[in-house]
Amino acid sequence: MIFFDLAVRNLKRHKVRSVLATVGIIIGVIAIASLGVMGSSLSVLFSGMVSDVSDTLLVTPHLAASSGDPFDPRNTLAARISDKNLGLIEKAAGEHRVVPMILASDRLHVRDASGYVTMYAMPAADIPFLLEEEAGIYPQGRSSGVMVGSLLADELDLHPGSRIEVGGESVRVVGIAAERGMAIDINPDYAVIVTEDWYTERHGGQDYSRVVVKVGDLSEIEGVKAAIDQQINRRKEVVDVLDSREILEIFYETTDAINIFLLGIGAVSLLVASVSILNVMIISVTERTGEIGLMRSIGARKREVLRMFLYESLVLGIAGSIAGGIVSIAVAYYVTTTVAEYLTDFAMSAGAGIPVTVVIGYVAFAMAFGTATSIVAGFYPAWKAAQLNPIEALRYE
Amino acid sequence: MSGEPILRFEEVSKIYPLPAGDVVALDLVSLTVDPGEFIAVMGPSGSGKSTLLNLMGCLDVPTRGKIYLSGQEISRMSDDDLTRLRRDRIGFVFQQFNLIPLLSAVENVEFPIILTTDREESRRRAIEVMRAMHLNDALFTHRPAELSGGEQQRVAIARALVNDPDLLLCDEPTGNLDSKTGTAIMEILAEENREGKTVIMVTHDPNVAAYARRTIRIVDGRLA
């Protein structure tokens, strides 16, 4: 391939120029790949904070006044889910785990600090199912021990064994719940968690404020939701069923938009790089006009001249893409491990960080884009070179 | 093919349209070149010598008239076909040597045939021709910039001959050389002609023209 040789030699002849043009592509490829990876890390980061509940249905009492927002305080105050309806929900949920809970608040007194604290009361057997423990044990049946959320524990310096005063009664902290982050079902980090028996013993039997249904298989969410709706809301709206995916979807749409925006920025930097390749190639063609004229006059065809210059920009593009790809992988590794660490700090779902295939996908995409951009940028100068009139080109000084 | 002229011009005109009016570079030129001839084309600058040589070398096509190269009419040929003729049937030697600076001497020589022949055969043929030009083997891998003018021109002649052309076209082949080196180059061309190669050479130097066996004079685009 004498034309390929010529292309490579010409690039070597103008080392600085070639390197600079390559740097442009390198930056562009890194920009696309790392912005892409960062974008998806961002979604992982966000969804890591909420994804624990992506398999969750939240059933709240329906209120005409309610906005449907599970955090709307009127929900807790005004309406409850009866045992009968709980039964219907359990029936509709089939084998999926149903966790009824009472949401309350009570006065908390620890040493000299005092204030109101959110309190979750749920069946003792369900506490380990919803919460991970950080220290101590889960509260059992009628025992007087309570569990506290990790952030509350940190703030008030509570440990298993500490005594706190809840609603005027001194109780023992038996366990600390691990940090869980924000979710649509429960937010226990600043709360006190007690068993249902503990609660009813002190406050009397009550209907539930909300029911959480854990649907193991995401594909069944829609079906379970419809079943609950059908069982209970047959004549009038009794409960609202909130699907965490609805929230996640809005969230994913947002991160997708951010991703596209970031990729757009990357694409712009590649565009700039392609202009620099265009520039280098035009200079190269102009400088070598005489040479092109000679080659044409001793038998190189138009398409061969075209090919020679395309090889030049192709080599620039491939070299830049490979270098950029390598750097991008390093950047992506750094970004994903940072995100993973951050998530671990948050005590989020295990195995956080974005999948390797996604990283490779973005890097490959960026490299392909970088190479393609170089070819496109090189095409016009190459075409111009091929169209040169051999006589005039020979005479060109 | 015997008896057929290598080159035949039939009332060939070349007109360059310019804003200030058409310039007639060649005006109804008719000529024939037989195999084995050694022709010098002479004339003052601007007389149309270069245009004539470009047409002979299939670098350009006539505005009017017909040109036959070994019986093939070229004026209606496509660019690719003309390029192929230049590659396979014609050898060019230029005043400025015009070697490709990125290629070594031997790579320059093999350029025209490597487009059609495999690398090994091209290299073998290139070395053979370069040795015939009395070029030292040590120079083969040198870049053109490392060679003297005479050496460069011998490399250029080797390149022109490597495809064993029907026609060797030389444009002031000694124009950039001192007289001693020029003489050596002319001896090479004369030797090629003695071995049967058809040589057409543009020059304004009568001493150089003296090597040719026929001289075509051209003035104002017409043969004189």
Image: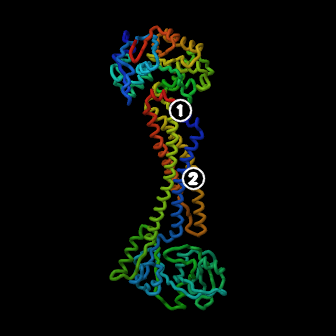
The residue at which mark 1 appears reads as A6
Q: Is residue B4 left or right of residue A118?
A: left
Q: Are marks 2 and 1 on the same chain?
A: yes
Toward the viewer: A124 or B45? B45
**Label 1, residues with CA under 10 Å away: few <14, some 14-19, many ≥20:** some
Q: Is residue A231 left or right of residue A392?
A: left
Q: What element carries label 2?
A: helix
**Amino acid type at image mark 2:** Ile
**Amino acid type at image mark 1:** Leu
Q: How far apart are marks 2 and 1 (CA)?
A: 32 Å
Q: Is mark 1 on a helix, strand or loop?
A: helix
Q: In this view, does A38 lie above or below B210?
A: below
Label 1 resides on the chain identified as A
* Residue A330 visible in rendering: yes
x, y percent for residue A83: 43, 85
Q: Is residue A135 above or below residue A47?
A: below
The residue at which mark 2 appears reads as A329
Toward the viewer: B5 or A279? A279
Where residue B167 sits, quadrant-wise, is top left
